[in-house]
Amino acid sequence: MSSACVSHAQPMPTAVGIGLRPPHFEHVLEHRPRVPFFELHSENLFCGGGAQWIMFDALRRDYPVSLHGVGLSLGSADRIDLAHLAALRELIRRAAPALVSEHVCWGAVDGRHYNDLLPLPYTDEALDLMVGRVAQLQDTLQRRVLVENVSSYIHFTHSTMPEWEFLAALAARSGCGLLLDVNNIYVNSVNHGFDPCQYIAGIPADAVEEMHLAGFTRKPGLRGALLIDSHDQRVDAAVWSLYANALACIGSRPTLIEWDRNLPEFAVLQDEARIAEGFLVPDQHADLALSA
Amino acid sequence: MLTSPSLLELQRGFAAAIVDGDTRLAAYIDARAIAPAARLRIYRNAVFAIQVEALETSFPAVRRLLGEECFDGLATRYAARHGSRSGNLQDFGATFAVFLSAQAEVAAFSWVGAVAELEWLRQECALAAGWPRADAQALTAALLAGLQLRVQPHVRVLSAQVPALDLWRHAMESEARTVDPAGGAQHVLLWREDAAVVMREIGASQAAFVRALRDSGNMEAAWSAANLVDPSAQAEGLLSGLLEHALLVP
C-alpha cells in the first residue's frame, strides 16, 4: 500500500449495522432507527444525483456509513475497468465513508461483465494478480480497503492453497484489511468440504476489520449438499455458531446484517442485528453513533 | 494429466460456460457428488437472473405492456446476445430499446421501442446530477441580457412517432385512459423534482429547442433548431415550463 494512504475520519463502532436497500430508505429516514451504522452498495451511488444521493446525504448526517462495492472485478485476468475505478474514487472522495470494501473475485473478461461474484482459483498466479490489484485500488483511493471472501459453488482442482491461506497472504502482501463473511465461510465449508473453524483459525485476526452475516438456502434436487448464498432469509443457526467461534478467535468487530432478496420489514433486520449484538463484546463508542 | 489453465484461460472458459453453456471448464472443477456442469449452470442461471432483473427494474412499463413471460424471454435473449459492458448494473440496458425494436415477436407492436426509450430516459433523468436551481428573476435577467443558459443535467427529451407517454401512463397509472397506439407522434420533456421524475408532453418545436440547447449549450443554435420545426415558434412558448420549473441555469 502506498505510504500516501490516508485513513477515514468517521469512526465505525464495534457494533452490528444493517445493509440498507432502497425499499427501506423511506422507513429509515422517517423513523431514524437505532442502528449503529449502515452499509450501502458503492455502485448505487455512482450516479450524479437523485433519490440515492438525497437519501445518502440525509443518512450520513446521523449514522456512520460504509460502502461495499460489488462490481469492480478485482480478479479479472485481463484488465481492471479503469472507468469503474475512477467512478469509485470520485464516490469515495465525495462520500468519505468509514469503511470501503470489495470482493476477492472476478466478474468480467474481455470487456464483458457478468455482474456476479465469480470464484478465483487459489493459485500463486491469482494471488499475485490480486495483490497488485488491491495495491492499485488502495493507491487510487488513497486509503486502506477491505476485501471480502465470497461464497462459491465451484472449487478448481488446480488450486494450490486453501481459501484462508489465499486471504491471509493477500492481506499480508497488499496491506489491505479483510471483511470476513461468516455466512460465506459456512456455505463454502459445506459446498467444498472443509472445516470452517480451521478456516477462521487461519485468518490473521489483526487484518479483520468487519464481518458480514446473511441467510442461505439449500439447493434441492442435487446428489450432494449445496448451499446458495441467497441473502433472502434469517441467519442460520450453524452460522450463528460459527460467528461465535469467529468472535472468540478474532475478537469483536463491526458486523453487518445483509438481506438482499425478499426483503422483510425493517424490524426483522433489526431483530437479526439484536441477536448478533448478543454475541459481541459491547463497544463504548457504539451509542455515540446513535442520534435518535 | 491435464495442464492447468492460466487465469485468463480459465476466465474465458467460465465466460463461455455462462454465455453458451460450454462445459470444457468442467475438467478443472472438483465434482464432490455434483456434476461440474451442474455447478457451472448455477452461475449461468444466476448471471442471467441478475441481468434480467435489472431490466425489469428499468423497464417496468414495457414489461406490463408485453406481459411478464414475453418480456423476460426477450430480456434473457438481450442479456445473452449483448451482455453487460459495465460493473454497474445501472448502466445495463442502454441499447435495449433498439434491440426490442428489431425482435420479430414484437414487430406488430411498433410502439415498443419508443416506450422502452422513454423508460431509459426516465432512468437517466433519475440518476443524473443536478445543479442548484436558479431563481426566476436571475433567469429573466440572464435572458434579457442575452446570456447563454444551460439546461439542467437531468433534463431529457423524447420525440417519438407514437404516443409513448400515453402508453407509459396506461401501463403504470391506474387511472390512465385507453390509448390508441397509432395515435400519432408525441414529444416528451422529462426532468427531476427532488427525487421524482416528472414527464410532460410538449410541442415539436420546444422539443427541438431543448434538445439543441442540451447538445450545443448555445441559445442561438436552439432558437434555430426550433424555427426549423416551426418558423412561427415564439420564445415565450419555447421557454414555458423550462423557466417555470427552473430547468435552465445561467
Image (tube, rainbow, N blue to C red):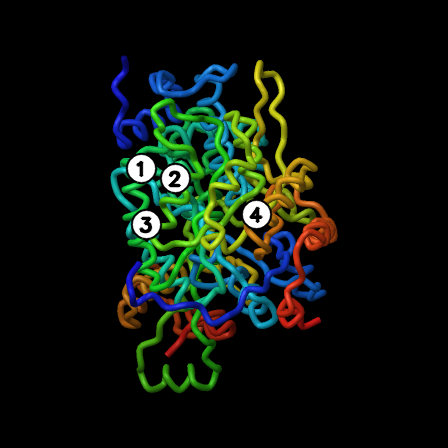
Instruction: Give the distance between the C-alpha atoms of the residues marked 4 and 2, in whole angstroms.
Output: 19 Å
Left or right side of A25 for A155: left
Report whether mark 1 lies on the same chain as mark 4: yes
Q: Residue at x 42, y 35 (%)?
A: A118
Crowd around label 4: few <14 · some 14–19 · many ≥20 (10 Å):
some
Q: Nearer the viewer, mark 3 or mark 1?
A: 3
Disc 2 designates what residue?
A166
N-terminal of the two: label 2 or label 1?
1
For image coordinates 62% across by 57% down, the residue present is A17
User: Which marked residue is nearer to the observer: mark 2 or mark 1?
Assistant: 2
Q: Give the label on residue A173, or none.
A: 3
| Of callouts 2 and 3, the N-terminal one | 2
Q: Which mark is residue A126?
A: 1
Q: CA distance from mark 1 to mark 4?
A: 27 Å
Gap between marks 2 and 3 measured at Cα: 11 Å
Q: Which quadrant would residue B149 be assigned to in this image?
A: bottom left
Q: Are marks 2 and 3 on the same chain?
A: yes
Q: Earlier in the sequence, mark 4 or mark 2?
A: 2
Q: Nearer the viewer, mark 1 or mark 4?
A: 4
Chain of residue at mark 2: A
CA neighbours of label 2 inside 10 A, class few (<14), some (14 to 19), many (20+): many
Q: Amino acid at mark 4?
A: Cys
Residue B98, how many percent across, how many down?
A: 38, 38
Amino acid type, label 3: Arg
- Residue under label 4, please give it: A249
Q: Secondary structure at mark 1?
A: helix
- In contact (CB < 8 Å): disc 2 and disc 1: yes
User: What is the three-letter code of the residue carrying label 1?
Assistant: Ala
Q: Is residue B71 visible?
A: no
A228 or A203: nearer the eye? A203
Q: Is residue B43 visible?
A: yes
Q: Residue at x 41, y 51 (%)?
A: B159
